Every structure is written in structure tokens, then in C-alpha cells.
Image (spheres, helix red, strand yellow):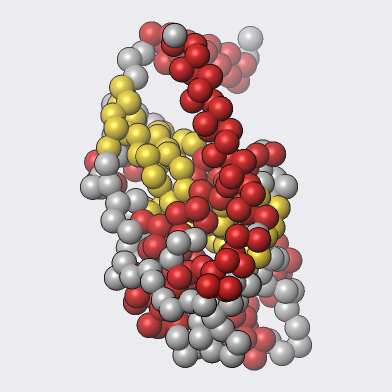
Amino acid sequence: MSDDEAFLTSLLASLDDEVNTVLNNSTVNVVDKGGDFSIADIPSSSSDTWIKLHNVVAVVCDLKGSTHLGTGKYDKSTARIYKSGVEGAVRILNEFDANFIDIQGDGGFGLFWGDRAYERAMCAGVTIRTFSGDFVDRLEKRWPDGLPETGFKVGIHADRTLVKRIGTRRVIAEQEAVWAGRPVNYAAKCAQTADRHQVIITQRVWDKLKGNDYIAFSCDCGEGPTASLWTDISVDRLPEHDRDAVVLNVPWCQKCGPSFCDAIMAGESKRDIPQSVRSAINKMKMQDALKAKRAREEARKTALRGVRR
Ligand SMILES: [Zn+2]
């Protein structure tokens, strides 16, 4: 056997050993944490502890058409578009106090938990949507001869997650926090489904925020308030029962946006909305999806009770 083969054979044998140990003989502790958990406390690779968080809201943003921005002749413009776009989105996630931020190529994600996690995530998502419009206006002015269609696509989902650092043991620089579970995965699928300048949110996020009049209904400008701010959409990349979602096409209103954002962040939720407008929300397909979901959960609980008897 050559040295190269010996190297590969021993690497694979050692990995198999390691997998066997982790699967069969390692202790795994899962520790439940509330909203006051800090990322500095994410267990390292050498630890056998995973942290479980019950309500983590993920905001994923993707730059549309980034693969078509290309390189070669356009190296410098592509580099500038990436830098200004991605840095802008990350700054927004930061300003709304995302608890964890990760940049991934042409986009990234922010995770929110603890106080007003849903509200902070939603305001960050709508602000990225708003920034997306301004950003593209500026790109079009700078390169009037045409660029591939671009702009941010945003997805939001909330769920429980397990987290720890994974990577080379005892070398912190080679370890990364891994968020196991649905929050980032589902939010990413929403972002992939969205077109540029759209925010798609899942059932769980809508269920939590639909009672907030500053989020559910449009502002008083024009014909407002209306119940047509959010419309039904299907995210076909998600499992069947989780596909119904809602999509937002518009940015913050130039006039009302700042005060609405302040109100949401301050925990306010009630506006003067005519009853006819309020009841229009119930005609959304999403309402049926939420009802069906509740029925399924109820049925599952009943089934569990049956098993215990
Ligand atoms: Zn307005």
C-alpha cells in the first residue's frame, strides 16, 4: 500500500471509530434554556452538552441573482454589490439586536430569542425589505446599462432548536455554532421561494403576529387601513402541512414606517381598525391552515392520552 492509501485508510478507520463512539457510548446532555441565554454560553466541541431553546426566530436573507452577477470583467462591481448589500443586511440584523448572526456568501441569517424576539425579527425583516428597494435603486443609477435582477429575498420561521459548537476539538477557531432543527432551514426555504423585495413568513410566525394591528394591517395612508398587506402563498419546498405561508410585498411606508416600527418595538399592538377590515383577515387561506394545524395537534394529544391510559 502506498503512503497515500495508508493515510486515507487510517483516516476513514479513525472517523468510523469516532462515529461509533459518539453514536453508542457518548453521554449527551440536553439543557433547556429560557430567553436569557447568551451566545457566549454555547457549549464547545469538547462538551457533551447541547442547549435547547424553545422559541428561536430565524430571519434569512438572500441576494437574488447573485450567481449571475458573475466575476471576470465585472469583478469589481460584483465585489462592491456583495459588500454593500450583505453588510447593509447584517447591520440591520444587528440594529434589531439579533442574538446571533451568520453571513453565508450572498446573504446570511439572524436568530432572535428572548424579549420581543418575534417583533424584533419582523421589524428586521421588513427593514431589509425596505433597504432592498433603496439598494437596487442605487445600483441601477450606478450601472444604468443593466445588471442582472437583484435585491433581497427574506424568509422568517420560528421553532425550537438545539445548539452547540462543532468542529475541531479544543481549537475554538475551528469550531462553529450549529443550530440543529427547523428555524434556519425553514426560513431559508421561505427566502428561496420569495422573489426579490418580498418577505415570506411561516404559519407559526404569522400566528404569533397576526394579532398585532401594526403588522397585520396596512397604515392609514391611501385607502388604508386594509387587510391586504399580507397575502397567502405556498412554500412548496416545505413539508405538506407546513407549506401555507404569507408574503409581504411592500416596504415600510415612508411616512408611517418609523412610528410603526417604534410602536412594534415598544410592544404596542392596538390600532383603530374598522371591524369590516378586521374580519377580512379571517378570509385568508392561512386561517384555515392554522385551524387545521390546531386540530392535528389536538388529535395528537388525544392519541397520546389514549396511549397512556
Ligand atoms: Zn403610511
| Residue drawn at the location 63% of the way across and 72% of the way down | 228
| Residue drawn at the location 67% of the way across and 55% of the way down | 285
| Residue 28 placement, left or right of 275 | left
- Rendering coords of residue 301 (x, y %): 49, 25
| Residue drawn at the location 49% of the way across and 36% of the way down | 181
Q: Is residue 10 visible?
A: no
Residue sitting at the far front: 275
| Residue drawn at the location 60% of the way across and 60% of the way down | 282
Viewer-proximal residue, 78 or 259?
Answer: 259
Viewer-proximal residue, 282 or 126?
Answer: 282
- Rendering coords of residue 306 (x, y %): 50, 14
| Residue 99 placement, left or right of 282 | left
Q: Is residue 97 visible?
A: yes
Q: Is residue 80 above or below residue 142?
A: above
Q: Quadrant of the C terminus?
A: top left
Viewer-proximal residue, 23 or 254?
Answer: 254
Viewer-proximal residue, 43 or 227?
Answer: 227
| Residue 208 placement, left or right of 47 | right
Q: Quadrant of the N terminus?
A: top right
- Rendering coords of residue 49 (x, y %): 30, 26
- Rendering coords of residue 182 (x, y %): 52, 40
Count of marks placed on residues: 0
Q: Is residue 291 above or below residue 28?
A: below
Q: Where is residue 270, by image quadrant? A: bottom left
